[in-house]
Image (cartoon, rainbow, N blue to C red):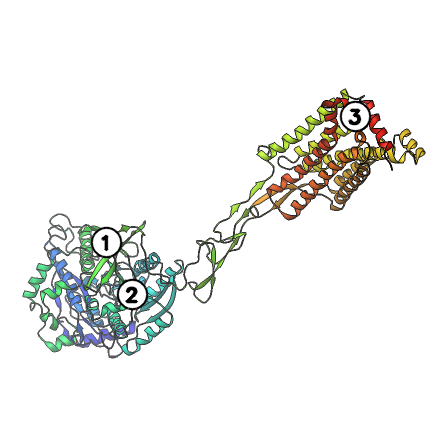
Amino acid sequence: MLFLVVMVSFHLVKQSDTCSSLPRLSLDGDYIVGGLFQLHEKYGGTGPATDTENRKPEVLQCHRFKFSSASYQQIQVMRFAIEEINNSTLLLPGVSLGYEIFDYCSDLLSYGAALEFLTQKGRGAIPVWNGTNYRPKVISVTGPFGSSQTISVAPLYMSEMIPMVTHGATSVQLSSKNRFPSFFRTIPSDKYQVESIVRILQQFNWNWVAFIGGDNDYSRDALTVFQDKIRPANICLAYQDTIPQNQSLIGRLFNNIAMFNVQVIVVFANVEFVIPFIQKAIDLRVKEKIWIASETWSMNQELIKKSQIERIGTVLGVTVQRHKDLRGFDEFINNTVKSRHENACTDMDLKERCGQICSDCNSTSAQTIIGEDPTYSFVIYSAVYAVAHALHNVLRCGTGNCANSEIIAYPYMALKQVKFKLDNQSIEFDENGDPPAHYDIVHWDCLYYIVQKHASIHYTPSKHCVVFKGLITDAGLFHSDILSCSYFLQAPVLQCSSECKSGSRRVQTGFHTCCFECEICSDGKYINHTADPYSCIACQKDEWARNGSTSCTKRSIEYLHSDASLAIFLMFQASSIILISMAILVLFLCKNDTPVVKSAGGRLCFFMLCCLSMSSISVFLYIGKPTEAICTLRNSVFVVFYVACLSCLAVRSFQIVCIFKMAAKLPKAYDFWVKHGGQWITIITTTVIMLFLCILWIAIEGPKPNQITLYSEVILDCTYGVIPIFYVIVLFAVLLGIACFSFAYMGTDLPKNYNEGKSITFSLLIFFISWVISLTVHLSTKGKHTLSVNPFSVLCSLYGILFGYFFPKCYIIIITPERNTAAYFQTAIQSYTLQPR
């Protein structure tokens, strides 16, 4: 680059005899502001301008390119701003601003125009560095428009800290103060423009897009920012390419777009690239696409008026926020056109070699200039005013005059602090030399060849607010007057894959994260679409979730709460058993000498009733949160006392059978059983065996609190400790019950008053049935309701003995006392003995 600059410098010095007084669009003043505008542009059938056609470092003949009336309008805005400042008594009083404006029609071959600004004021040649200071001709440079052109010439001015205040260079590279310390701009950085485009895609939920750019820094830098912004926004770049300079090759881009099935195309390129690209889309009959236009072409009047432009689909665009028309500008243009030859060149040969403004200006009408796209009018206007305000501060101007009007002014530092209002718009720069970003979102109404504003996006250093208005439909038109932040009605779904339903995770099917299949999350897992839409997350141990869940729910802790209606019912029944047992005990004590009490077992009944009462206490141990003590006593209390009660029934059944059926056949054995208290020995032995088994069970490993995790609940229950010993205990109780049942069944044909067999058989049937049901329920179902099965079985077993064995005797004692006599019992025995065997 340095070599090129030196070569161009020497070449221009060589030409100084011919161009010592360069024809230019200029105005003398105390301080000169430079301007570089691309008045002639090379685009159309062969693509954008290139610098490959001319290798020799000389000024290109710009007039051979297409004249840009839009750029000519921009030049006039700069002239208008300077004239307005010179006529002001408040800004730079007593100080006049001048300008020198050149046609920057090519990146490389227009270097002569850029270098002209580095000449010393009052001299006609570019100085060769000799170690001494010099005063450049201009105090600042406005332009050039494009990012690549600006990046190319900026180093020339950065070395002398000459401020560049550009109106069109939006590349993010230019925000680097290390490379471009004296660069400023009144148009926002592409960082915010790209973010605005990404916001549009997000708002419409479009995540399968193509990015088409030009072969320059403007597009390349935007692509880099775009790729960074779309990753967290879950937008996939399906295809990206550069518009070729040869229009015949553009068709390849549309073939690739169709191959990737892309419906949303972001075209981020300068207008000289976009015009042949859009024209090719029209020629190829590309239809029903959605085009997102960058600010360089979103307001272009030539494109929107192209024939059959409506075929290509819907065009949305981002544009720098437009301001109302500049007051007095129309009048200024009319006056300028009247005196259009005032600063024109007269020597055509000199005009061609020095790249000046002249020839096409004469044929441009005032109406053409005024009717051009005014998007960049205010940013050029504010760029000139920013330089003027900075100079105003450097010269320490007050009311009526400037204190330091004769000094050599360098407004670079003052531009950093400049802040003022212009047409109610705040003009200021951040630490990177960038202004606040304000964009409009526009839509092309191809029916009426107009561009309609439908949204605004504002970025400030502290916060940003996005206001969207309108609705896009499949027909490609906006409608509705709804205005709210981030609010849209229905829009076409343009995605690689439709969004998964709630509770389903994405399973990526290709390279792009936007292409996926959906898989529902299974039981016990959930998905957080915001954090990670690709993974089902397992719930915590104390949580649960159904399949297709988006969150987990805490498992409910279930046990028999003391205030639950079921628990109250169980406690009431257990208390009833205790009260009934005690009542029967009192009744039997009062009728202890009667035949019914004696036939029921006498003192054996008292022991049985006490055991029934103690067994019912175990029901209370099923209520409340299980603890180690409760688990230890719960089953042990019931089984020990219930086995003792069963022993009494077994002994009583055996004893009656012996009296009536075995005493005559084995008189000595029966006498031995009676004399040595056989019934109590049997009862105590079986009870002690059961007590020993329970103690052994608890000593080795007794029941302990346990959490049974089910689908949506955690059941607090007790374990069964050492399973083999537990089975031995159960088996012992079952065998005792079978023995008791056998003896009772053998005595079912005894005298009616001594017929205990039927009562005991009934009691044991209830015992067996209740515990078989309990076992079946435990094996077949799990849940909080199974907690009440065991206490219900306990109650059934106890009520079975009360109803089956004791209640019939209570009925005789209370209701039919005439049957509770010795004579009645004697009659029953005689009737039994007289029956034939």
Identify which residue, 232 or 126, lies in the foreground.
Answer: 232
- Which residue is found at the position 43% from the left and 53% from the top? 530
- Which residue is found at the position 63% from the left and 35% from the top? 623
**Separation of marks 3 and 2 at Cα, in angstroms:** 105 Å
Count neighbours of disc 3 (C-alpha within 10 A) and say few if under 14, some if 14 to 19, many if 20 or more. Answer: many
Count neighbours of disc 2 (C-alpha within 10 A) and say few if under 14, some if 14 to 19, many if 20 or more. Answer: many
Residue 401 at x, y = what percent? 12, 50
Residue 84 at x, y = what percent? 12, 56
Count neighbours of disc 1 (C-alpha within 10 A) and say few if under 14, some if 14 to 19, many if 20 or more. Answer: some
For residue 291, the mark is: 2
Residue 686 at x, y = what percent? 82, 36
Identify which residue, 111 or 20, lies in the foreground.
Answer: 111
Give above or below for 9 relative to 454. Answer: below
Question: Horizontally, is 263 left or right of 279 in the view?
Answer: right
Mark before the other along the chain sequence, 1 or 3: 1
Mark before the other along the chain sequence, 3 or 2: 2
For residue 596, the mark is: 3
Residue reaching furthest to the top: 590
Identify which residue, 710 or 420, lies in the foreground.
Answer: 710
Check contact, mark 2 vs mark 1: CB within 8 A.
Answer: no
- Residue type at numbered disc 3: Val
Residue 162 shows up from this direction: no
Residue position for label 1 = 414
Q: Quadrant of residue 337?
A: bottom left
Q: Quadrant of residue 835?
A: top right
